[in-house]
Image (spheres, rainbow, N blue to C red):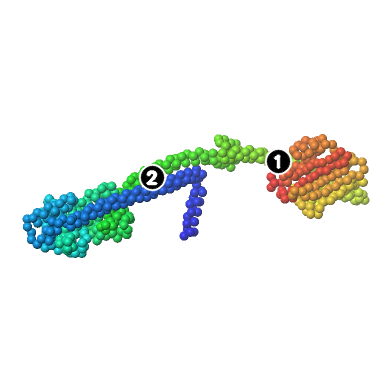
C-alpha cells in the first residue's frame, strides 16, 4: 500500500516537474492561495455549524426547561386544589351524609363550581361521597361525561395513591353523544379531618389543549415539534389533540426518543423519518414527565447553508481571481526566460548575433546579463581560436621555409661522407655523418612526438658538430633526472634554444663557454633550464624579447628560432606553458621552458 502511494506521488511529482515554468508558477500560486482559503472556509463553516447547533440546542434546552417548569407549576396548583375539601367543614359533612337533599346538592354544586373556575382548562370536577354518590360541575359544551363508568377506575387509583394526589395520564372522555375530549386527570382521596377515614374522592379533568399554549412558543422559536410524555412513557401531548389515537409512526419515534433519555436534561441527534434531528429534553423531578422538542437539522442549519453557499461562492471568486493574477504574474516572470530560451536556440544553430535586454535587476535579469557576457566570451574564444589557427599555420610555414629541400641536402651530405671516407679523411666523414643525423632527425616524422631523451641526444649531436668546427670553444653539461627522460615532447624544442645560446651568447665570449641543461618539477609542470655563461643582454633587450614571446609578435628582431619554439609549445601545451628568458650582461642567459606532461597533441588541446 505504501509503495503504491509513493509510486503515485512520484508520478504526480514527475508530471509537475515536467510542466513548463509558467504552468508551474500558476499551479503553485493557485495551490498556495486556494488551499489556505479552502481550509479557512472549511474551518469557518465548521465553526459556524457548531456555534449555530450549540446555540440552537442551548436555546431549545432553556425553552423545554421553562415549559416543563410551567407544567410543573400548573400540576402543583391542581394538587393544592385537591386539599381544599379538607378545610371546608360543609363539604366534610356532605361527604359523610348518607342521603342527598337540596342543601347537599346546593352546597356541593357551589363548591365544585368554585373549583372548576380556578383554572380555565378544567373541563370537569367530580366529587364522590362516602356512599358512592357522584357530584360534578362541567365546562360549557361538556354535557355527557359518564362519571359512573369511571368510578371503579377512580377508586383503584385513589387506593393505590393513598392520601397523596394521583395524576392519571392522557385519556379520552365523552362530552356528548358525538364528541370526545382528550384530558388528563388529577384525583385525590378525601379523608375525614376528625377520623382520618376515607370519605370521598375529588377528581379534576383537565383539557390536554392547555399544553398547546405552553408548547407552541417552543415550536415557534425552535421550528421543531414538542412532545410531552408521562412517567409511564405514554404520550401526553404532541400537537395532535384532535385525534384520539396515536399514529404508529409517532409511537415508534416516541420509543426511540425515550430510549436515548438518560439524564434529567440533555440533547442528542437521531434519525427520524430518514432525516437527522436534534432532540432536546427535560425530565421533571415533580411529575416525572419528559418534555422533548425534536428539531430537523435542516432547519437549524438553513442559515449556515446560506452562509456556506455564500462562502463557497466567494472562495471560488477569489480562486478565479488568483488564477488570473497567477497567470499574469507567471507570464511576466517567465517571459524573459522564454526570450532567453529562444535566443539560446538561435545560438545553438550558429547565430551569435543575439542580445538579451533585461528590464529588471532580479535573478532573471542577472542571468540575462551573464548570458550576454557568455555570448561575448564565445565570440572572443572563436576569434582567439581563429587567430591561433592562423599563427599555427604561419609557424608551420616558417618551419617549412627553413627546410630548404632537406632530402636533397641529406642525400648530398651522405655522398660527401662516403667520398671523405674513401679519401681517408675521418674528420670530414664524422662531421658529415653528424650533420646527416641532424637532418634525418629533423625530417623523419616531424609531426610525431618524441621523448626528452631523444631531444637531448639531438642536442648532443649538434654540440659534437660545434666541437669539431670550434675545438675547445664550447662545453655541454646535461643534468636531467632519469624520470624525466621518458616524458613525451614535441620535436625540436631544445636545439633551436641551444643554437640561439651558442651564436648569441657563447660565440662572443672570450675563452671556453659552458651550456647547462637542467630540469625540475614545479606546480604540476616540468621546467627545463637552458643556461649559458655567455655575454648576456641588457634589460631593455631582455624586456623586448620576453614581450615578443608573451604576445606572439611576428617581428624579425629576435629571429625565428625562439619565437617558433615558443609558439609551438603554447599551441601544444596551452598558454600557461612556453619560454621565459632571464639574462644579465656579462653573466649569461637562462631560457626556462615549461611544459605540461599531461597534455595531448595540439589539435586536442585546441
> Could you tell me which residue is drawn at 12 percent across and 51 percent down?
141
Q: Is residue 434 visible?
A: no
Q: Quadrant of residue 91?
A: bottom left
Residue 338: percent from the left, percent from the top? 53, 40
Q: Is residue 527 left or right of residue 81?
A: right
- Residue 442 position (above or below residue 86): above
Query: Which residue is outermost to the front?
Result: 194
Rendered residue at 38%/45% (across/down): 312
Determine which residue is flagged by label 1: 388
Residue position for label 2: 312
Q: State the image coordinates of residue 240 (x, y, percent, origin top left).
A: 20, 53
- The residue furthest left is 102
- Where residue 200 sits, quadrant-wise, is bottom left
Task: Please identify the quadrant where the C terminus is shown.
Answer: top right
* SS type, badge 2: helix
Q: Nearer the viewer, residue 111 or 277?
A: 111
Q: Nearer the viewer, residue 222 or 70?
A: 70
Q: CA distance from mark 1 to mark 2?
A: 71 Å
Question: Is residue 524 something one can see in this rendering?
Answer: yes
Amino acid at each position: 500500500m505504501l509503495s503504491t502511494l509513493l509510486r503515485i506521488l512520484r508520478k504526480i511529482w514527475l508530471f509537475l516537474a515536467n510542466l513548463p515554468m509558467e504552468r508551474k508558477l500558476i499551479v503553485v500560486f493557485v495551490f498556495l492561495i486556494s488551499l489556505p482559503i479552502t481550509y479557512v472556509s472549511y474551518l469557518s463553516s465548521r465553526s459556524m455549524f457548531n456555534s449555530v447547533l450549540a446555540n440552537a440546542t442551548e436555546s431549545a434546552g432553556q425553552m423545554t426547561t421553562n415549559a416543563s417548569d410551567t407544567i410543573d407549576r400548573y400540576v402543583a396548583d391542581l394538587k393544592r386544589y385537591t386539599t381544599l375539601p379538607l378545610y371546608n367543614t360543609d363539604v366534610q359533612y356532605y361527604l359523610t351524609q348518607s342521603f342527598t337533599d337540596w342543601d347537599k346538592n346546593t352546597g356541593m354544586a357551589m363548591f365544585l363550581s368554585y373549583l372548576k373556575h380556578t383554572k380555565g382548562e378544567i373541563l370537569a370536577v367530580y366529587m364522590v361521597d362516602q356512599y358512592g354518590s357522584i357530584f360534578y360541575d362541567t365546562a360549557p359544551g361538556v354535557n355527557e361525561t359518564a362519571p359512573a363508568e369511571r368510578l371503579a377506575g377512580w377508586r383503584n387509583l385513589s387506593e393505590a395513591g393513598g392520601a397523596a394526589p394521583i395524576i392519571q395520564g392522557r385519556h379520552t372522555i365523552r362530552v356528548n353523544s358525538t364528541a370526545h375530549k382528550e384530558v388528563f386527570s388529577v384525583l385525590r382521596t378525601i379523608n375525614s379531618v376528625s377520623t382520618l377515614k376515607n370519605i370521598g374522592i375529588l377528581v379534576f379533568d383537565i383539557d390536554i389543549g392547555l399544553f398547546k399554549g405552553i408548547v407552541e412558543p417552543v415550536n415557534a422559536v425552535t421550528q421543531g415539534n414538542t412532545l410531552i410524555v408521562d412517567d409511564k412513557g405514554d404520550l401526553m401531548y404532541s400537537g395532535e389533540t384532535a385525534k384520539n389515537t396515536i399514529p404508529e409512526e409517532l409511537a415508534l419515534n416516541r420509543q426511540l426518543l425515550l430510549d436515548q433519555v438518560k439524564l434529567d436534561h440533555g440533547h442528542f441527534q437521531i434519525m427520524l423519518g430518514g432525516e437527522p434531528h436534534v432532540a432536546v429534553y427535560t425530565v421533571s423531578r415533580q411529575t416525572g414527565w419528559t418534555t422533548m422538542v425534536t428539531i430537523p437539522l435542516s432547519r437549524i442549519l438553513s442559515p449556515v447553508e446560506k452562509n456556506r453557499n455564500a462562502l463557497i461562492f466567494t472562495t471560488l471568486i477569489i480562486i478565479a481571481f488568483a488564477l488570473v493574477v497567477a497567470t499574469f504574474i507567471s507570464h511576466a516572470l517567465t517571459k524573459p526566460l522564454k526570450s532567453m530560451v529562444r535566443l539560446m536556440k538561435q545560438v545553438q544553430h550558429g547565430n551569435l548575433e543575439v542580445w538579451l535586454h533585461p528590464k529588471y535587476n532580479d535573478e532573471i535579469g542577472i542571468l540575462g546579463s551573464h548570458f550576454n557576457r557568455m555570448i561575448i566570451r564565445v565570440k572572443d574564444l572563436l576569434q582567439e581560436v581563429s587567430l591561433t589557427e592562423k599563427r599555427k599555420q604561419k609557424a608551420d610555414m616558417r618551419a617549412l621555409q627553413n627546410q630548404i629541400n632537406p632530402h636533397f641536402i641529406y642525400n648530398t651530405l651522405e655522398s660527401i661522407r662516403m667520398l671523405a671516407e674513401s679519401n681517408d679523411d675521418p674528420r670530414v666523414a664524422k662531421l658529415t655523418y653528424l650533420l646527416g643525423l641532424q637532418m634525418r632527425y629533423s625530417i623523419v616524422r616531424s609531426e610525431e612526438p618524441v621523448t626528452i631523451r631523444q631531444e637531448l641526444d639531438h642536442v648532443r649531436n649538434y654540440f659534437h658538430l660545434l666541437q669539431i668546427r670550434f675545438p675547445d670553444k664550447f662545453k655541454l653539461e646535461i643534468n636531467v633526472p632519469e624520470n624525466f627522460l621518458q616524458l613525451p615532447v614535441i620535436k625540436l624544442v631544445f636545439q633551436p634554444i641551444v643554437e640561439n645560446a651558442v651564436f648569441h651568447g657563447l660565440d662572443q665570449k672570450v675563452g671556453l663557454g659552458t651550456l647547462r641543461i637542467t630540469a625540475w618539477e614545479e606546480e604540476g609542470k616540468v621546467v627545463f633550464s637552458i643556461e649559458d655563461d655567455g655575454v648576456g643582454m641588457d634589460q631593455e633587450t631582455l624586456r623586448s624579447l620576453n614581450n615578443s614571446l608573451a604576445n606572439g609578435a611576428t617581428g624579425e628582431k629576435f629571429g625565428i628560432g625562439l619565437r617558433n619554439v615558443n609558439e609551438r609549445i603554447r599551441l601544444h601545451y596551452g598558454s600557461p606553458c612556453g619560454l621565459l628568458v632571464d639574462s644579465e650582461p656579462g653573466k649569461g642567459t637562462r631560457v626556462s621552458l615549461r611544459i605540461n606532461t599531461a597534455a595531448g597533441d595540439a589539435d586536442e588541446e585546441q
